[in-house]
Amino acid sequence: MHQPTEATLDIAASKMRSPLAALARSTLRVCLWDRPTLAVLVLVQILLLLPALMGYPTLSDQAIGQEQARQTREILLTSTANGVYDSAPADLKDINARELTALGEAASTPYPSRDFFDAYARYYDIELESVKAGYSEPDPSLYARSELIHRLAQLENPEVYDTAAEMSATYYLAFVLGLMPGIVPLLPIALLAGASQRRLATRSLEQAAPIHRAKKRTTALGVALALALVVLALELAPATLLALVRNGLGNLAYPVVQIVDGNVASTTVREVLAKDMALIIGAALVTTALAATAEAILPRCGLGLSLALLVAPLLPPYASRETEWQEIARHLPSSYLSCGSIVGMPVYANGLDIASSRARRGSWVAPRSWHLRRRWFSRPFSLTRYKKDPAQGGCRGGSHDHVP
């Protein structure tokens, strides 16, 4: 009996694989020319470009800017001249005098520069002494701002971006990924997954090929997963290239300081970008796989399930941390789609806890101790306000009325 040669077996195997390869090519062609996916992809690219094109403000001047240092110094000078601290304890007078010296150096130093942040960091060190002495309440935003300024002072040539148009490529990419909700980068991928699975329901030559249905699903899923990574690259490319041409690559060691669950977390742009990429790639793969699985169980429901996954975190009941639903929601994939609420983002106005309110992230809130200081400046100094309570080891929380 004639035995087939190795070449004959290779040709036969190639013919057997050809229907599967044809299916993959057909699915790829359909996905690449899916009009809804292409339209949404262009829309996402525009959304990621908007902060840079419109000059989205970073509020750096209100958070760590030289003008803020000058205003603080003017308030301290005015209060001292008006006798607010005439009857204050000696250690508080010393704190104010040293703060005035540090603020004076910061106000007269070129900004932004290492010398400016060195002087401003000394001011925050003294401010934290005030907290330890009981003259200011401890607040995470105060510690976060102090940490950010100290980290900036460690850079050789610290930069400060007043708007998104001035950001370097790496800083802008980390910033814009944290700024946008998860639905923005993931919506084209959800549409892509739906298109890849819908191809299996059409009548075509490839579909008529003798291939097991599970293999067809797996092939379509593999194409969608590969294209998901390509789509992510296409989404981020225009914004990254624009920032790169305008402002260069940037410093990957640039500090990023956040408040997470009441604790100050300090990291760098490099680490934020690495976590962002891991999170968004994982979310893209999960969205694609979930759509394919749902389509296999119930035809034409894959896209609907993907959209529900992306839209759910935007609903107010879902985002509220005061509902019992949060105990369930925190275990769902939909709770881990937004880079900003999971990883955080580089901001100067870092006075808000990213784990407590995503909706308000990015707006600046002055530290509580700053409000206390402003209340001190608005009335005569009261010695009894700062009297320690031996039983509690802290400031007595009584009346704020001054002593006549």
Image (tube, rainbow, N blue to C red):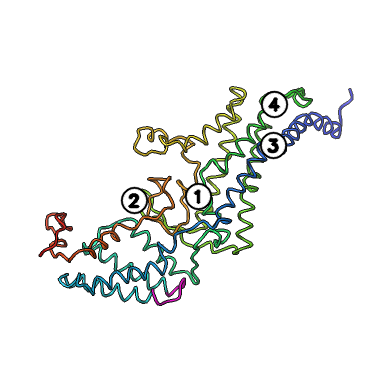
10 Å crowding of disc 2: few (<14), some (14-19), many (20+): some
Residue that label 1 marks: 179
- Residue 276: give x, y in percent of width and height: 52, 49
Find disc 2 in the rendering and name its residue. Answer: 262
Pick whichever of labels 3 and 1 is earlier in the sequence.
3
Disc 3 element: helix
CA gap, disc 4 and disc 1: 36 Å
In the rendering, at what x and y percent does residue 332 appear?
46, 35
Marker disc for residue 35? 3
Q: Select label 4 or label 1 by which is in front.
A: 1
Structural distance between the alpha carbons of marks 2 and 3: 45 Å
Looking at the image, is mark 4 or mark 3 earlier in the sequence?
3
Q: Which mark is residue 200?
A: 4
Foreground: disc 4 or disc 3: 3
Q: Is residue 111 magenta?
A: yes
Q: Secondary structure at mark 1?
A: helix
Foreground: 111 or 194?
Answer: 111
Residue 74 placed where, x, y %?
32, 71
Residue at figure coordinates x 32%, y 58% from the top left: 367
Q: Is residue 368 left or right of residue 390?
A: right
Query: Is 154 on the left or on the right of 2, as rendered?
Result: left
**Contact check, label 1 and label 2, Cβ < 8 Å:** no
Residue type highlighted by circle 3: Arg
